[in-house]
Amino acid sequence: MLFANSLHILCFGDSLTEGMSLGRPHPHPYSIALKSSLEEAFPSFNVTTDNQGVSGDQATSPPGSFLPRMVKAYEETHPHNPYDWAIILGGTNDLSMEYDTKDIYEALQKVWAIPLSHGTKVLALTVPECGFDDSPITVHGDELNKLIMEHKDENYHIFDLHTAIPFRGIPDKKRGELWGDPVHYSPKGYDLVGKLLAERLTGLIQAQSIDGEVQDAEGRTELRKRDLAAG
């Protein structure tokens, strides 16, 4: 694969993307560790991230603003600095408002469709576990995550964040290190999210390289054999 010497990643979502946790006035987003980990994996790349996490926002638009915010990103930023990847995490606040999971899934599909239609690859994340047993996030989260994981589209990829960093079933000490409250990660937890996402992206990028694809400036791909045939 012939790479441009840059990798621009949109990190899009709610407070879990912004990097918030209860009692901490300053965010610590996963995009920090994501960037540093990708720079280690691809030292010749200029890696940049655009963190578009907004606390309290919902994928269901309206009343949420996921869709108009994504439209704005692709009207204002993408034309001048194209996104190669969009990491999208949404649904936590929608579940907490007890919206129907199928409606949330349909809203997410509309959000995913914007980067996909512009040649950006999407890495969709499952909704993380919630520490409140009676929360709608806990009750209906698995149903929404199943829809996210079973979705199929060209250039659409998933990462099961729910399984990767559990709230339950781990030692209390580890939970205290990784979770800032029953919904949000701690700074150390967000760093782990960033490292795990970097590993996932690294694997996907390397797999594309093995496939012998050539990526153009818009993030679309052409098979190397077409270039050879033309030459």
Image (cartoon, rainbow, N blue to C red):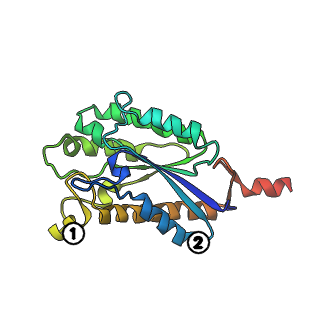
Q: Nearer the viewer, residue 29 or 200?
A: 29
Residue 74: x percent and y percent? 56, 39
Asked if 124 appears above or below 68 in the picture, the reply is: below
At label 2, counting other C-alpha atoms closer than 10 Å, the crowd grade (few under 14, some 14-19, many 20 or more) is few
Q: Is residue 213 left or right of residue 182?
A: right
Q: Is residue 110 visible?
A: no
Q: Is residue 49 left or right of residue 100?
A: right
Query: Residue placed at 13% from the left, 48% from the top?
Result: 133
Query: Residue placed at 30% from the left, 53% from the top?
Result: 20
Residue on which disc 2 sits: 43
Q: Is residue 229 visible?
A: yes
Residue 52: x percent and y percent? 44, 46
Residue 59: x percent and y percent? 37, 36
Q: Which of the numbered marks, if any, corresponds to residue 109?
A: none
- Which quadrant, please, contains the C terminus? bottom right
For marks 1 and 2 on the same chain, the one whose residue lies earlier in the sequence = 2
Q: Secondary structure at mark 1?
A: helix
Specify the amino acid type for callout 2. Pro
Residue 95: x percent and y percent? 26, 38
Task: Spot the residue most to the left.
Answer: 134
Residue on which disc 1 sits: 174
Query: Residue placed at 31% from the left, 41% from the top?
Result: 144
Q: Are marks 1 and 2 in contact (CB under 8 Å)?
A: no
Q: Is residue 224 left or right of residue 96?
A: right
